[in-house]
Amino acid sequence: MSKVELPYQLFDADNHLYETKEALTRHLPEQYEGAIQYVEINGRTKIAVLGQISEYIPNPTFEVVARPGAMEQYFKHGNPEGKSRREIFGKSMKAIDAFRNPEARLKVMDDLQLQRALMFPTLASLVEERMRHHPELIHAVIESLNRWMLEDWGQDGNFVHSGRIFTVPVITLPIVERAIAELNWAVVEHGAKAILVRPAPVPGFKGMRSFALPEFDPFWKRVVELDVLVTMHSSDSGYSRFDAEWEGSGLEMLPFQTNTFAMTNQWRPVTDAVASWVCHGALNRFPDLKIAVIENGSAWLEPLLQQLSDVYKKAPEGFGFRNPVEAIKQSLYVSPFWEEDLERLSEVMGADHVLFGSDWPHPEGLAEPARYIHEIKDMPLDNQAKIMGGNLARLLGV
């Protein structure tokens, strides 16, 4: 592994752990036994949610995975030869201890030149969408996952391990009072510095609705009081059902299969999520919210800001007479893909609002995260230091 000359420490906003088979069920109450199952289908282990087998993650045991950074060339140069996903991924690998264990991960972080990292779950991204008609079950499964992460990735009852790994608990919102209780448990009792909220409408007993509606104000009020960072990481936001209506199918979201229509619309969920923050008024009511958009790139941002600017010109009263673009630029922090125009993003949002994230060890990310600095080498050194870790350290208060 090549070493990069670093004039500053790296704080990665997007690292991942791979869950074990008991992650979702270790602390699941008995009345929900069987809601999550691992089943054998034609010699392969699959996950079944409420009796429905999911293909969203092809190998949910993560015993064999794609290599970190396997898709680097695909994202940088495209796929002119039309290779299949299997060909792009190349040879897979057996999961190493660093994917499952924080002590082993710290050693690999040293090799990767990462001083600190936010640590996100992987399997969690399928939970909420597949249980959207069962709000109480969503809470139970997410709470079980959070307790597993605290036990397996925390340290001394704290979500921060060795001052370097900042594991991010998930907060699901269907039942607001329960969400607040979980927030207090994670942040006040167990030291979480950031929380993960899905960039999607919230399921509930009366259907779906935006997380930015006044109904959720008690939750966001508590978030601001605790001064905790809200992260919105790429997930299954449920938009595959809209794709399915266009295509006449009932398929779930399958992120590793080629679907050009879905690819064309892939940033619709984050676009709608960010628009909702201002259109439904949450950033007016809570301007001190800190929201980091992770692993959604930044291609969607400028078109959205332009659209919001146009709508504001025509209907300022709909935004409480606060410019939505200014509101977004105050509260939003963006972790772009390494292959994007990072200097342009810094001009649009300000270098103070850009976060380095490698997505390690996922195949979509960088095999060697420190090489990210080559993409910003022409920026002022002070801005580089902010993007590569200073901004995130400030947001977390560490």
Image: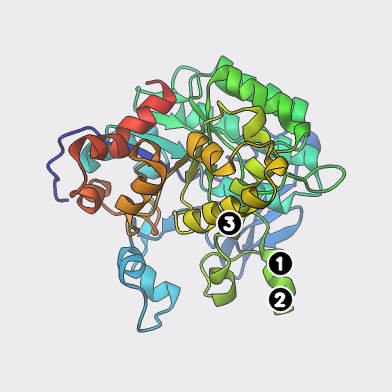
Q: Percent x, y for residue 384?
A: 24, 40
Which residue is labeled 2 in the image? 246
Return the mark for residue 307. Answer: 3
Q: Nearer the viewer, residue 176 or 28?
A: 176
Report crowding for label 1: few under 14, some 14 to 19, many 20 or more residues within 10 A (C-alpha): few
The residue tagged with tag 1: helix, strand or loop?
A: helix
Q: Amino acid at mark 2?
A: Trp
Answer whether residue 13 is visible to the viewer in this image.
yes
Mark 2 or mark 3, earlier in chain: 2
Answer whether residue 358 is visible to the viewer in this image.
no
Q: CA distance from mark 2 to mark 3?
A: 24 Å
The residue tagged with tag 3: helix, strand or loop?
A: helix
Which residue is labeled 1 in the image? 242
Q: Nearer the viewer, residue 184 or 40?
A: 184
Question: CB atoms at circles 2 and 1 under 8 Å apart?
Answer: yes
Report crowding for label 2: few under 14, some 14 to 19, many 20 or more residues within 10 A (C-alpha): few
